[in-house]
Amino acid sequence: MLEAIGWIGSAILVLSLVQTRILRLRILNLTGCLVHIGYNTAVGVWPMVGLNVVLAIVNVVQLRKLLKERHADEGGYDVVPTDVDAPLLRHLLTRHHDEIVKLHGVEPADVPATQAYLVLRGDETVGAVLLDDAGDGTARLTLDHVVERYRDFTPGEHVFRRSGILAGHGYDRIVTRPGITGRTAQYYETVGFTRDTTTDEFVL
């Protein structure tokens, strides 16, 4: 039984290393370290206990930092306007084509848009937002895609609520397409949207 616990800890550590989402990687790695601390303490392998204690501390520190940044502050992300046909935007949408179809149920090339924004964190492009002007200060959100690495975070919170960039373009209302459910619905609620039961759209 003890040997099985050691192997389980090793499996969790290996699993953590193949994660693309940073938050999930840290949580799994910390779990594997804690299992190994218990296992190596039980069998008396003290150098491995020491190593896993240090790694656990590193994971805790990094997790605290990640969770603090999860709801990004003013300087966490940059929102950069771009042309709807800009090569970088088209490259991003093409590169993540299958994910976009799976998560959003739309073909990137068919998404109507009059305005587009890239979301950056430092030098890294973490997402894209496409809007269609519906008139009267309303923007219809036609695509809001975040790359997997940052999907545990909320860059949309900065785009829609903190950056002021959409208000600066004259928008005071943002609506999504109708019928959104599941994790996407939870995401919009986290960002600050509310569901309009009449139209079945999320509205900010």
Image: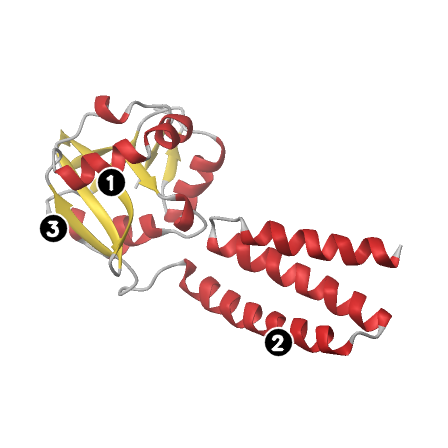
> Comparing marks 2 and 1, which lies closer to the viewer?
2
Indicate whether 193 appears above or below 68. Answer: above
The image shows residue 133 at horizontal and vertical percentages of: 14, 32
Give the amino acid at mark 3: Gly
Give the quadrant of the C terminus: top left
- Give the distance between the C-alpha atoms of the residues marked 2 and 1, in whole angstroms: 40 Å
Point 42% across, 59% down: residue? 70
Give the amino acid at mark 2: Val
Q: Earlier in the sequence, mark 2 or mark 3?
A: 2
Tell me the crowding category of disc 1: few under 14, some 14 to 19, or many 20 or more residues within 10 angstroms, Cα based.
many
Identify the mark at residue 129; answer none if there is no mark.
1
Point 70% across, 65% down: residue? 34
Label 1: which secondary element = strand
Tell me the crowding category of disc 3: few under 14, some 14 to 19, or many 20 or more residues within 10 angstroms, Cα based.
few
The residue tagged 2 is: 54
Which of 34 and 197 lies nearest the eye of the viewer? 34
- Give the distance between the C-alpha atoms of the residues marked 3 and 1, in whole angstroms: 16 Å
Point 52% across, 72% down: residue? 61
Give the amino acid at mark 1: Val
Identify the mark at residue 168; answer none if there is no mark.
3
The image shows residue 137 at horizontal and vertical percentages of: 14, 37
Indicate whether 148 appears above or below 57. Answer: above
What is the image's colouring? secondary structure
The image shows residue 4 at horizontal and vertical percentages of: 83, 53
**Dividing the picture into quarters, in which one does residue 179 lie?**
top left
Label 3: which secondary element = helix
Tell me the crowding category of disc 2: few under 14, some 14 to 19, or many 20 or more residues within 10 angstroms, Cα based.
few
Indicate whether 194 appears above or below 34. Answer: above
